[in-house]
Amino acid sequence: MAESKSKAGTWRSVFVLLLAFGPAIILILIATSHCKHKFKRLDDFGVIPKYEFTTSSGKKITNNTFKNDIVIFTTIQPTCPDSCGISIWHLDQLIFQITRSKKRLKHIKIVSIVTDYYGNPSNNLKDVEFSLKDRVDGYNPDMWLVVKGDPKQIYNIENNGVNLIHKSNEFFGGISYQELMLLADKKNHIRMIVSGKTEDSMRTMRDYMSLLEREYKQNEIKDKE
């Protein structure tokens, strides 16, 4: 009974955060529709805050790094995949394996910020990269970047009075952003926030990616007209 109450509390907290950043079910239905007149763009939550991260090779990653790329931001812990803020296996299988296998999706990047259990910046990049290379088929560090730096740089955003930096024992490590993924468009605008804990939520992120891709295709059609 206690475990059931704990899980319910966690999902209530996650639900409040995600509800503040857009109605997922409606968007998914629109994204999977083939009717042009039903097409709806993802909400725009503004430009992602300025950030600077560093890869294991010492390369600096900033807001100007991913021009014309769609980027998914996550955290990742050296304890993965046994103890993680998000489901690394589902991120691999449902997003990375799809993007790496299709040339038309090479512009989609994953940036995983290495943190310790409590969400603090960690320098343990080598171990995380080793784990990904060992477990992820075709792992490509140019498409799935492992970086160090303070994750609060990008998660310190607010909408409808709700901030993504939310402390609670209900979250992994006691901090909400460890369980959240951000979707940034080609102009570095945050277009969606999704929980990364389950298979369903990872599929939801994939649907949002498809909707964003469709937005760009619609723009191309309009430009040609």
Image (cartoon, grey):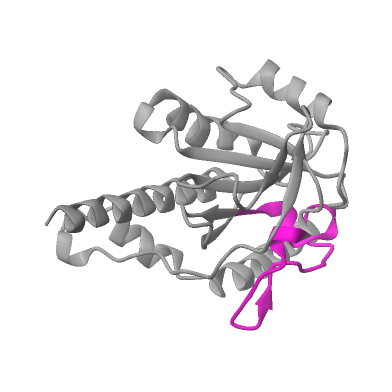
Given the current orientation, which residue lies at the most extreme left position? 225
Image coordinates of residue 88 in percent, x first then y, are: 65, 36
Image coordinates of residue 110 in percent, x first then y, are: 58, 39
Q: Which residues are magenta?
A: 153-181
* Residue 223 visible somewhere in the drawing: yes
Q: How many marks?
A: 0
Is residue 70 shown in magenta? no
Q: Quadrant of the N terminus?
A: bottom right
Question: 88 or 198: which is nearer to us?
Answer: 88
Horizontal side of 130 relative to 14 (left or right) equals right
Q: Quadrant of residue 163?
A: bottom right
Q: Is residue 200 above or below residue 40?
A: above
Residue in the picture at 79% in, 53% down: 172
Residue in the picture at 35% in, 54% down: 211
Question: 214 or 55: which is nearer to us?
Answer: 55
Q: Quadrant of residue 38?
A: bottom left
Horizontal side of 101 relative to 9 (left or right) equals left
Question: 39 or 93: which is nearer to us?
Answer: 39
Residue in the picture at 76% in, 54% down: 151
Q: Quadrant of the C terminus?
A: bottom left
Question: 211 or 89: which is nearer to us?
Answer: 211
Is residue 172 shown in magenta? yes
Q: Is residue 60 above or below residue 216?
A: above
Residue in the picture at 29% in, 61% down: 30
Q: Is residue 40 above or below residue 124?
A: below
Image coordinates of residue 199 in percent, x first then y, are: 54, 43
Image coordinates of residue 200 in percent, x first then y, are: 50, 48
* Residue 1 visible somewhere in the drawing: no
Q: Is residue 91 above or below residue 166?
A: above
